Image (cartoon, rainbow, N blue to C red):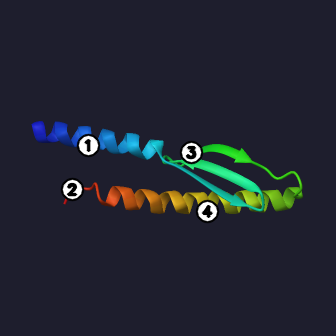
Amino acid sequence: MFDKLKQINELRKMQQMVAGERVTAERNGVKVTINGTLMVEEISLNPELSQIDQERALKDAFNDANKKMQTQLASKLGGMMPR
């Protein structure tokens, strides 16, 4: 029983650590910041770009941030997983 409680406590710690992670990616002056739960926290647009260019830059920045976050979390969580 205590092993299960210990596992639950470890999972909560991992969840808090993941939620606290932040990654920002930029494309053509458009910035996207996401957290460890892959929720967008901030978007900064570039008013010098056309709407189509902003949309493309936003999509690319978000995808880049998402990949960075996945890599970062895999690196951190890989060392924390029980074997």
* In this view, the mark in front (4 or 3): 4
Q: Which residue is mark 4?
A: 64
Image quadrant where residue 41 sits: top right
The amino acid type, in three-letter code, at marker 1 is Glu
Element marked by disc 3: loop
Tell me the residue that label 3 is attached to.
Answer: 39
Local crowd size for mark 2, using a 10 Å CA cut-off: few (<14), some (14–19), many (≥20): few
Mark 2 and mark 3 in contact? Answer it, CB < 8 Å. no
Question: In the picture provided, is 31 more to the left or to the right than 36?
Answer: right
Q: What whole-number distance in Å separates the C-alpha atoms at marks 3 and 1?
A: 23 Å
Query: Which circle's residue, 2 or 1, is located before the other in the chain?
Result: 1
Alpha carbon of mark 2 to alpha carbon of mark 4: how far? Answer: 29 Å
Residue type beneath disc 2: Pro
Residue 1 seen anywhere in this rendered image of the structure: no
Circle 3 Cα neighbour tier, 10 Å, few/some/many (<14 / 14–19 / ≥20): few
Q: Quadrant of the N terminus?
A: top left
Compared with 5, 81 (above or below) is below
The structure residue drawn at horizontal position 42% and vertical position 46%, both measured from the top left corner, is 18
Q: Position of residue 54 (x, y in %)?
A: 81, 57
Residue pointed to by mark 2: 82
Is residue 64 visible in the rendered structure shown here?
A: yes
Q: In the drawing, what numbered circle is on residue 10?
A: 1
> In the structure shown, which secondary structural element does the residue marked by tag 1 occupy?
helix
The numbered mark, 2 or 4, whose residue comes first in the sequence reads 4
The percent position of residue 79, horizontal first and vertical second, equals 29, 59
